[in-house]
Image (cartoon, rainbow, N blue to C red):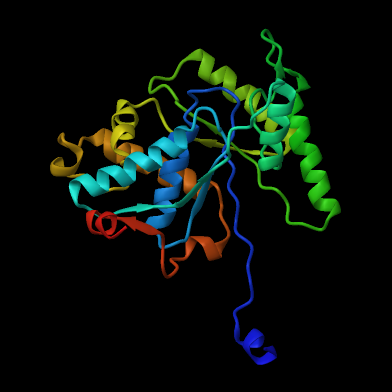
Amino acid sequence: MASLASALPPSRSAHVIVLGNEKGGSGKSTLAVHLIVALLKEGHRVASIDTDSRQLSLTRYVENRARFARRMGIELEVPAHFSVRLGEGSVVAEVEAREFAAFAEVVDLDVLGRVDGEDLTVTAISQYADLVQRARANRRAAGMRELNWVVARNRIATIANRNQQNVIVGLQQLSAMLDFRIADGISERIIFRELFPTGLTVFDTLEREVLGVEPTMSHVAARREIRELLDRLALPPRLRAPAAGGGIVATAAAAAAQ
């Protein structure tokens, strides 16, 4: 047994990417699926966990993707997917406690802090930001790798306006205070809504036979946005280098064999 153990490659923990925002409709699932597929196409093994046990938007997206691959007879990469079970109980606190216990390290990031509406100065940080700061402190105390916090501005309007500039100013102040990096996420594009029913992403083959419509420059621009965000995440070099055996491939043949 000793010789067998010595022959095995050293185990490596997975690199975890958490996308969180307490508000619905902020683009978490869309962004998650696109990052997942981008990494799968680079050859990495990817597992996804949907912690929103009520909405299950990420789960639906992945299911749509596998179903569309079977129906069209095409190959589409899908992650090894899991979801947190909905807690059961008569008291809300008990239900939330069970769900939290199922995935105790998830932090939903909503409001980062309070910003004065007149001079745009930060007056206080939010409970979520404080929770992340304490989580960072706990990781450092345990000798773990530093948590890399990136705040992405998602569903960005294509036309710049004064409110966008105010948001950027507030984020820059909070970034200096809380030590997170700012990144642009995805713009408000109709294409992302059109892709959800089929489970497709902008990284899949953009052909009329697959999409059902002629691809446009919006598809290309959306792909560029996701790639730029992936670069901005500054993942460890071992993750950005292609690896053997990417992910599960959903096909019509595979479905028939099951």
- Of residue 46 and residue 223, the one placed in the foreground of this image is 46
The furthest residue to the right: 141
Residue 216 is situated, as x and y percent measured from the top left of the image, at 21, 35
Which residue occupies 74% across, 37% down?
132
Is residue 201 visible in this depiction of the protein? no
Position above or below: 65 against 191: below
Asked whether, in this view, residue 58 is left or right of residue 208, the answer is right
Where, by quadrant of the figure, is residue 208 drawn? top left
Report the quarter where the N terminus lies: bottom right
Report the quarter where the C terminus lies: bottom left
Is residue 132 visible in this depiction of the protein? yes
Where, by quadrant of the figure, is residue 97 drawn? top right
Position above or below: 16 against 52: below
The furthest residue to the front: 90
The furthest residue to the top: 118
Residue 198 is situated, as x and y percent measured from the top left of the image, at 28, 37
- Of residue 205 and residue 92, the one placed in the foreground of this image is 92
Asked whether, in this view, residue 158 is left or right of residue 135, the answer is left
Residue 37 is situated, as x and y percent measured from the top left of the image, at 39, 49
Residue 158 is situated, as x and y percent measured from the top left of the image, at 38, 23
Asked whether, in this view, residue 164 is left or right of residue 98, the answer is left
Position above or below: 220 against 248: above
Asked whether, in this view, residue 35 is left or right of residue 54, the answer is left
Position above or below: 127 against 244: above
Which residue occupies 63% across, 25% down?
110
- Of residue 18 and residue 186, the one placed in the foreground of this image is 18
Which residue occupies 60% across, 51% down?
16
The count of marks equals: 0
